[in-house]
Amino acid sequence: MTHDGVGLRAVMRSVACLTAGALAVPALTACGSDDKAGKPLAPQDIARVARAQVAEGGTLRWAMDAVPETFNTFQADADATTTRIAQAVLPSMYRIDANGRPARNPDYLESAKVVDTEPRQVVLYKLNQQAVWSDGREIGAADFAAQWRALSGKDSAYWTARNAGYDRIEKIERGANDLEVRVTFRRPYSDWQSLFSPLYPKDVMGTPDAFNDGARRKLKVSAGPFALKQVDREQGRIRLTPNPRWWGRPAKLSELVLTAVSREERAAALAAGKIDLAEIDQAAAQRIDGAAQGGAGPLAGPGGGRNAAKAPGPWALAHASDGETAQDEKYARQKLSKAVATWERQQKALRDFEVRKSLEPAYTQLALNGADGPLADERVRRAVARALDREELVELVLEPLGLPAVPVGSHLALSGQEVYADSSGALGGQDTKEAQALLADAGWVPGGPVEKKKREKAAGAEREKNAGSGKSGEEPSRGGDDGTYIVGEDDKAPGRAEREHDEDRGRQLAHEGKQSVNQHGVPGAYAPRGTAAPAGAASEALAKDGKALTLRFVLPSGAGSEPLHAVAERITRMLDKVGIRTEITKVADDSYFRDHIASGEYDLALYSWPSSAFPATDARPIYAKPVPASDGSLSVEQNYTRVGTDQVDQLFDEAISTLDEEEQRSLLRKADARIWAAAGSIPLYQRPQLTAAKKNVVNAGAFGFQTPVYEDMGFLKKGAKMPAGPSEK
């Protein structure tokens, strides 16, 4: 789980604890005729070429967020880079194909199938006879058994983040020979293919000390096309080199270097020749696209634009004395001239790069906290959902990028995956009248005497402190002097006195030829009183029992979160139309989940979940019904909306225990329909995946669903032809 500003990266794997792999048991049942999964909405974009067209050697420098705290993917602080390294250096029995579906990895696994179901489910793995660890030892049953014992949950000395699936295993044995592994389950487990991907050597999994500490800083033994050669935490660099004992197709690169570069600095790092491949945000993508078209692109920062250095200094003119004005303006012009020159040099260098676009295997949702407050009432949650025009929200994010703007119809899968089916009809589409009827039924009515909400002392002191120091922190984006303004008995409408002050000041400034700015420092145009409201204007605020219907909308404030802010603003307008008011608060990225989402300090929030190939296992803790813990608190697992039902839990339990693929799909789709009906979370759009790549980098970029094939990555051989267009990449 993550929000768009922080990115999917670390939190997706460590907090959500989701794994990659496969879903069904094809040996037992075939796909049914009711498969509604379809195809992925967007193809991967990786400049795919045959290995014969990839040059031998070369160093590919790939941006990462930071050197990971651990190389053990089963620990709580593992992140996306932990997963990336594991994919390159460790065995995986299954990996995901471009359609988001499982594929046996022949480099490690000749076959795997359920050979018995009574009295116990037994899976027989037949390993590739060439598969060995980098120390020369064969990969075998001892490694499988050590990983099972470490992750079974029976020994609390192992600091594991997850044990789903491993806790259902009864025993692991050697088969007819050293290349066979028999896994016997205590209870049926449909997602057995999720296990042992990645697989660590018994040296890492064999003891609690080795598990807890042995693979945090290094991996002595590996078994992939690459090996972990060097970790430089001070320089923020990780070097992977080809594994000399690798038995598969040899890696084309002579070195793969992962380099720590923050998201906001990646465009500059690309231009400076420090990296060749990087996941980027929309602003960086626009820069690269602009460079390809021969333009310098918009200049970020004060002044903005190519002509910023020629423009007068309005701030200096307005605030400096006559004696200081000329000097200050000269300094500002010099500073802007240097900035423009640097920007244009970078734009020229960025012409060597292109943006490869697809959709991530993850979706962004609107989360509604149903623990308490107005949203504890299902009718209010459903009203929020029915007020939303999801198509409009999707278009806002994806259309400018040229990506398919199709709302996500499932909580448990994405288009192309086997479980996917659009179950949003269980809740219904946008309907203002239905939303208003639901609110009225819940007792929320227009007008009525309500009290002005007082800001909490601690929050108020912190806000005043931040305002005085110029620091960023929690910043309500609308409302009165206390962060909110609720309809009062003597007021015409929310914020009447403030708006009248701003309107009067706006007319005065307009007469003087100046831009109007309200008392909160927000520039804008303010129409005189009496101007007719535009179509679709906000409805009268709703109230119940002396309290107004105002929801806390919490968002991250960091770099890259602009798309979330735009979506939140549009959602606010949609809710205004049915009488629901929102109080938007932007908080620091590092506290967003810890202090707000996980702790339940929000009403509305935007964040993303990855789409797993194993929804019966991985999605269950996200939608499980919260239960009281032994200490009296509420145990929510990863269900941060606190909305769940016994029926959904039962459907997940049945889905995880059936070995019939078609039955499992049906059970999961029923569960998804009930999750929609409960309206705890509203899927919006599949997240855009934007990757900047040097134009001669091949078999890498926006991977979509597919697990990267590291041995095929590299640079185009001299004289070879690049794919003609994105559909061929």
Image: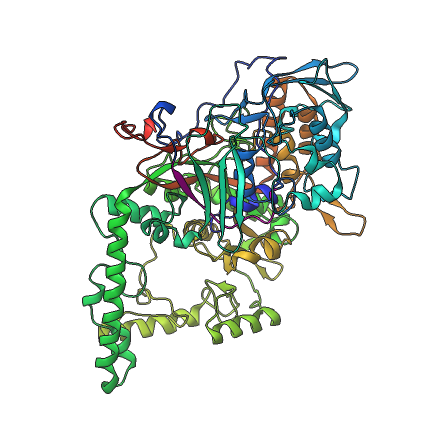
- Dividing the picture into quadrants, the one containing residue 71 is top right
Please state the horizontal and vertical placement of residue 259, each as a whole percent of the image.
Answer: 45, 48
How was the colour assigned to the protein in this rendering?
A: rainbow
Residue 515 seen in the figure: yes
| Numbered marks: total | 0
- Dividing the picture into quadrants, the one containing residue 592 is bottom right
Seen from the viewer's position, the closer of residues 616 and 288 is 288
Seen from the viewer's position, the closer of residues 38 and 569 is 38
Seen from the viewer's position, the closer of residues 90 and 638 is 90
Q: Report the magenta residues as a range.
A: 58-71
Q: Residue at x 74, y 44 (%)?
A: 209
Report whether 407 appears left or right of 288: right
Please state the horizontal and vertical placement of residue 188, each as a whole percent of the image.
Answer: 73, 22
User: Hey, which residue is sitting farthest right in the picture?
Assistant: 630
Whether residue 501 is in magenta: the answer is no
Residue 2 seen in the figure: no
Report whether 561 appears left or right of 601: left
- Dividing the picture into quadrants, the one containing residue 459 is bottom right
Please state the horizontal and vertical placement of residue 57, each as a whole percent of the image.
Answer: 39, 34
Q: Quadrant of the N terminus?
A: top right
Q: Residue at x 25, y 75 (%)?
A: 331
Whether residue 69 is in magenta: the answer is yes
Seen from the viewer's position, the closer of residues 497 and 265 is 265
Q: Quadrant of the C terminus?
A: top left
Please state the horizontal and vertical placement of residue 485, each as a whole percent of the image.
Answer: 50, 66
